[in-house]
Each structure stands twice: as C-alpha cells, then as structure tokens.
Amino acid sequence: MSERGSGTILLTGGGLALAPNSEFISLSIGKAGIRALTLGTFESLKRKGIHVATVTVSTAVAPDSEAAEAVAECFWHLHSQPIDKWTAEEMYPGPR
C-alpha cells in the first residue's frame, strides 16, 4: 500500500475500549489497543495515502442480522470516503 500510495485498513473495535469492564478486562485492553493503534497511526498513514479506520461496535451483533448489515455499511462508508473526508473511527451503538 505504501509503494502504491493508496489502500484501506479497516479494524473492528468494541465498546469495551470506551467503557472497560473488569469481568472482560483482557478484551477491554485488546479493544482499547485497536482504537489506540488506529488513532495513533491515522495521520501518518493518511500522508501516505492509506486510510486506517475502525468501526467501534458497542452491542452484540448476530450473523445475518440487520445489525450485521448496519455494521457492514459502517465499514463501506469508511472505505468509500474521499481522502479529504477521511475519518479514523465510526461508532455503531446498536439499535435505538
């Protein structure tokens, strides 16, 4: 991607990055790490034409559900953004 000067790296984060839970501390740490990696590399990779972003999912998502389709749309939205509109994170809070 660096040689080509373009590309997209999309990661799946979780709400535990924002609200850690002592019963799921290792998962909380992992999700916080994914978020930190994304936010920490966003600007430097953007300068190389690489869009790194994460979708932070704060609810359970079942396969083939409306929520799964909504999360997929979040990923597509991030991938489809023009470079001047790139964002590092999109939140999926779940159904309202």
Image (cartoon, rainbow, N blue to C red):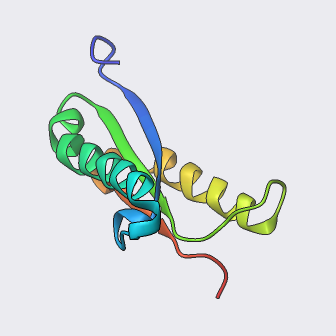
- Residue drawn at (21%, 28%) of the image: 48
Extreme-bottom residue of the structure = 96
- Residue plotted at (64% across, 88% down): 96
Q: Is residue 28 above or below residue 52?
A: below
91 above or below 63?
below
Locate residue 24, reporting x and y percent. 46, 61
Pinpoint residue 84: horizontal percent, then vertical percent: 28, 51
Question: Which residue is depicted at the point 67% across and 81% down?
Answer: 95
Considering every residue shown, the one lying at the far top of the view is 3
- Closer to the camera in the image, 17 or 54: 17
Q: Residue furthest right?
A: 64
| Res 87 quadrant in image | bottom left
Residue 86 appears in view: no
Q: Nearer the viewer, residue 61 or 1?
A: 61
Relative height, residue 21 to residue 51 (above, below):
below
Q: Position of residue 66 (x, y in %)?
A: 79, 67
Between 42 and 16, the one lying in front of the other is 16
Q: In which quadrant of the rendered image does the N terminus lie?
A: top left
Q: Residue at x 62, y 76 (%)?
A: 94
Look at the image and tell me whether residue 61 can be seen.
yes
